[in-house]
Image: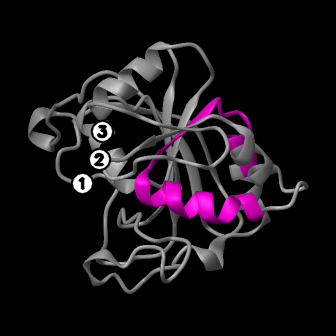
Amino acid sequence: MRTLMVTTFISLDGVMQAPGGPEEDRDGGFEHGGWAVPFVDGQVIERMTELTGRAGALLLGRRTYEEFAATWPLAGADDPIGAKLNTMPKFVASRTLDSVAWQGSTLLTGDVPDAVAELKAGDGGEIQVHGSGGLIQTLLAHDLVDRLHLLVFPVLLGSGKRLFAEGTVPAGLELVDGTTLGNGVFAGTYARRGKVGYGALGPEIGNW
């Protein structure tokens, strides 16, 4: 069984929309595109280089796929992230695309949750989802995400598409790796850990 890991940049209030540029995603009149860029330094790039380097395949939604396919082939041969993305297997979930041309890309057919479940059941290394906010919501709703790699940026946006939107399946998580980078970004990896636990807290029950 292959592990499926979502990796994304999010603001402190959970927004993941358009971290990389003003024109990346203006849905809903979003005006904060590029909010992560001032914090992207050598440590962030090093973190993402290590992460991408261990991936066995990439799973992308249409919008992110089209952005990546238009830009990453332009990366130089000495760019480790670009070299990895350009040569690794890529699977694209889309209801509108008829074909995909970026090297190593395959268009998923049929029901997306079923196709992803079949992909996870096959052989190969870790499947990584980058960006792809709409696809992530589908994967979370169908309990297909094994790990979350989140880079939490010290900024509040107040509006925009959030990672944990309506339809998220309640689940317990375990922090398996976490570090604060020099620019204030917290990079943490969370693994699934059963169901949500419940209890009560207060002086009247003697545990406060």
Q: Label 2 near label 1: C-beta < 8 Å?
A: yes
In the picture, measured across the screen, residue 27 lies left or right of residue 51, that is: left
Residue 24 vs 95, above or below: the answer is below
Q: Position of residue 44 (x, y in %)?
A: 70, 60
Cα distance, mark 3 to mark 1?
9 Å
Label 3 neighbourhood size at 10 Å, few (<14), some (14-19), many (20+)? many
Residue at 59% of width from left, 52% of height from top? 187
Quadrant in the rendering for residue 46: bottom right
Quadrant of res 138: top left
Q: Does 3 appear in magenta?
A: no
Q: Name the secondary structure under disc 3.
A: helix
Q: Do residues under tags 3 and 2 come within 8 Å of each other at their CB atoms? A: yes
Which residue is tagged 1?
165
Residue drawn 71% across and 33% down? 54
Q: CA distance from mark 1 to mark 2?
A: 7 Å
Residue underneath mark 2: 137
Which residue type does callout 3 highlight?
Answer: Leu
Q: Residue at x 25, y 31 (%)?
A: 142
Q: CA distance from mark 3 to mark 2?
A: 5 Å
- Please tell me the numbered disc located at residue 54: none
Q: Is residue 179 left or right of residue 170?
A: right
Q: Is residue 52 magenta?
A: yes
Location of mark 3 (residue)? 140
The amino acid at mark 2 is: Gln
Q: Nearer the viewer, residue 140 or 193?
A: 140
Give the tally of numbered discs: 3
The quadrant in which residue 93 appears is: top left
First to last magenta residue range = 49-74
- Position of residue 202 measured from the top left corner of the image (x, y, whole percent): 15, 43
- Sequence-wise first label, 3 or 1: 3
Position of 77 with respect to 131 (left or right) is right
